[in-house]
Image: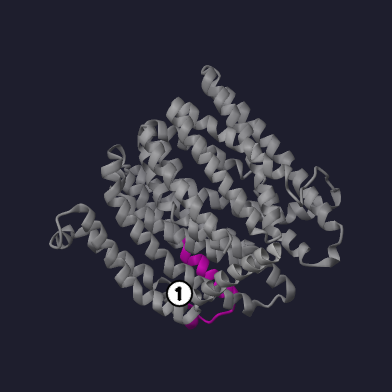
């Protein structure tokens, strides 16, 4: 409950960035910033295996007293290994920038700062994972909120004052500020490498590194294809549309983020697979039913708002529907992959990812031989992430030893709201004349569409609450938190 308000606040500031930055930058400049951010995204690959291995094992160590002082030694060894690999990657990025941009002094200096900023960002990410292992989501929330607010404010101010160079430099400045959380960390890691831990870290880290690498490939293949074939102008438009669709993911990815260390600790206690399956069914039902409602409302609003507020990016509405479809399947696969990783099925995740990447490569190759346009790229993206989402779900159901009949029923049950609400959005969007009968005012038309989605969603929400008691649980948690705050305040006053 602590993490969710932080995510909502983060959502607000992320929304502010989405609305302000494209207003200050032309699509071509926005495309350049997308390229820089893409490089920063791939910087996480350098040590993602180590970070994932630490994220996987440290919560187990904290919940088991048998590890003793080995917990701190393992933490420090992961941190030292993590820093070494990140430093090498950042130096490699600086060399790459110099080779390609040595004639443009100002741009080179800015890009070198970005490379240093990538190193600093990853240090903060390690601190976040330490706090997450302790299940201290208050500190995680403070870290995330501070990072989002400072980066958003710096980005908007720097872009307004100095344009694209200011926007890129703000990435470096915000990452320097985040070092505060490393300095103030209670369970602060130190640079201390034990050779005894190198081999187990590498063995587990390699498989998880592969998972993260392939995950980023799946997530960025469409953007890389647009950059290579369509130019910076189209990249800016496509990246903006993708960012708008992914705003919804901030809320639902946080649920997966919070539950992961809890699942690891629960499974490590008795390795009870049925308990994990029961949690999967419950939380899967909640996430897979509420996500389409949010996506539908945001899509309807964005489709009308963008042409009015950002006419330079209005062409995004031609293909944005497919990106919103893809957003659901990304969340769907995230949930399934999380549970697969908990029950040590990393190889199943890697196999599914390779299938999705192969399918994407075939589809993009076909698109390249035909006429390349953003509509086609977005459609291909929605297809290969859909395939990936379905096979990841089937993989978990198979690993959980659920029979084919039950698996089929559960899959249909998970996807029913998505199919119904997607069909509704498509019909409403394709038949504008039906809505115009009620009103000619565009604002009222948008409200009517959103109201229609919410009316259809009511039955899903009532059924969901009946099966999972989610609203009662939220109410009880909020009430308990409020009582704890009142008790704490009364003790201080007494």
Q: Residues within 10 Å of mark 1 (few under 14, many from 20)?
A: some
Taking the image as drawn, is residue 140 in sight?
yes
With 326 as the anchor, is 375 left or right in this view?
left
Where is 63 relative to 165, above or below?
below
Q: Position of residue 67 (x, y in %)?
A: 84, 63
Q: Is residue 398 magenta?
A: yes
Which quarter of the figure is the N terminus placed in?
bottom right
Foreground: 433 or 478? 478
Query: Could you say whether the residue bearing mark 1 is in a helix, strand or loop?
Result: helix
Residue occupying the point 40% across, 74% down: 461
Q: Position of residue 216 (x, y in %)?
A: 54, 49
Where is 475 relative to 57, above or below?
below
| Residue that label 1 marks | 411
Q: Position of residue 127 (x, y in %)?
A: 69, 49
Q: Position of residue 484 (x, y in %)?
A: 64, 68
Q: Where does the magenta region start and end?
A: 388-407
Residue occupying the point 66% across, 44% down: 124
Q: Is residue 433 magenta?
A: no
Which quarter of the figure is the C terminus placed in?
bottom right
With 324 as the anchor, is 400 left or right in this view?
right
With 238 as the anchor, is 210 left or right in this view?
right
Q: Main secondary structure of the magenta part?
A: helix
The color scheme shown is: one colour
Residue occupying the point 43% across, 61% down: 328
Taking the image as drawn, is residue 348 in sight?
no
Foreground: 393 or 9? 9
Given the current orientation, which residue lies at the most extreme front position?
Answer: 494
Where is 192 relative to 493, above or below?
above
Number of on-image labels: 1
Residue occupying the point 80% across, 48% down: 77
With 233 as the anchor, is 429 left or right in this view?
left
């Amino acid at each position: 409950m602590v993490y969710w308000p932080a995510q909502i606040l983060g959502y607000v500031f992320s929304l502010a960035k989405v609305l302000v930055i494209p207003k200050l930058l032309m699509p071509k400049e926005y495309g350049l910033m997308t390229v820089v951010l893409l490089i920063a995204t791939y910087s996480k690959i350098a040590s993602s295996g180590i970070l994932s291995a630490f994220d996987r094992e440290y919560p187990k160590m904290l919940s088991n007293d048998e590890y003793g002082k080995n917990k701190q030694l393992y933490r420090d060894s992961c941190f030292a290994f993590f820093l070494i690999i990140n430093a090498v990657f950042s130096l490699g990025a600086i060399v790459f920038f110099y080779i390609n941009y040595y004639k443009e002094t100002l741009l080179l200096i800015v890009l070198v700062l970005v490379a240093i900023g990538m190193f600093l960002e990853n240090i903060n990410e390690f601190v976040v994972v330490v706090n997450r292992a302790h299940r201290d989501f208050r500190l995680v929330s403070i870290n995330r909120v501070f990072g989002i607010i400072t980066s958003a404010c710096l980005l908007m101010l720097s872009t307004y004052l100095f344009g694209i160079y200011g926007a890129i430099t703000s990435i470096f400045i915000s990452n320097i500020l985040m070092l505060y959380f490393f300095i103030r960390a209670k369970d602060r890691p130190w640079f201390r490498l034990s050779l005894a831990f190198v081999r187990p870290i590498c063995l587990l880290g390699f498989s998880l590194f592969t998972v993260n690498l392939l995950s980023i490939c799946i997530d960025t293949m469409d953007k890389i294809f647009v950059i290579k074939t369509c130019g910076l102008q189209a990249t800016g438009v496509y990246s903006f549309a993708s960012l708008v669709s992914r705003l919804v993911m901030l809320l639902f990815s946080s649920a997966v983020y919070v539950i992961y260390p809890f699942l690891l600790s629960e499974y490590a206690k008795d390795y009870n697979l049925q308990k994990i399956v029961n949690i999967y069914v419950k939380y899967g039902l909640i996430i897979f039913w509420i996500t389409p409602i949010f996506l539908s409302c945001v899509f309807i609003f964005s489709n009308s708002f963008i042409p009015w507020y950002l006419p330079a990016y209005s062409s995004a509405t031609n293909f944005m529907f497919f990106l919103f479809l893809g957003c659901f399947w990304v969340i769907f696969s995230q949930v399934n992959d999380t549970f697969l990783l908990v029950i040590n099925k990393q190889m199943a995740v890697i196999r599914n990812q390779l299938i999705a990447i192969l399918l994407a490569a075939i589809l993009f190759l076909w698109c390249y031989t035909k006429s390349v346009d953003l509509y086609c790229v977005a459609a291909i993206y929605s297809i290969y992430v859909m395939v990936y989402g379905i096979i990841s779900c089937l993989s978990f159901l198979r690993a959980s030893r659920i029979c084919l009949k039950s698996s089929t029923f559960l899959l249909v049950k998970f996807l029913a709201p998505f199919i119904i609400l997607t069909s509704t959005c498509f019909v409403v969007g394709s038949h504008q004349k039906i809505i115009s009968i009620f009103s000619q005012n565009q604002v009222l038309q948008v409200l009517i569409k959103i109201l229609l989605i919410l009316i259809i969603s009511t039955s899903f929400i009532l059924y969901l609450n009946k099966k999972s008691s989610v609203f009662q649980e939220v109410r009880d948690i909020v009430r308990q938190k409020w009582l704890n705050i009142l008790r704490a305040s009364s003790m201080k006053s007494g």
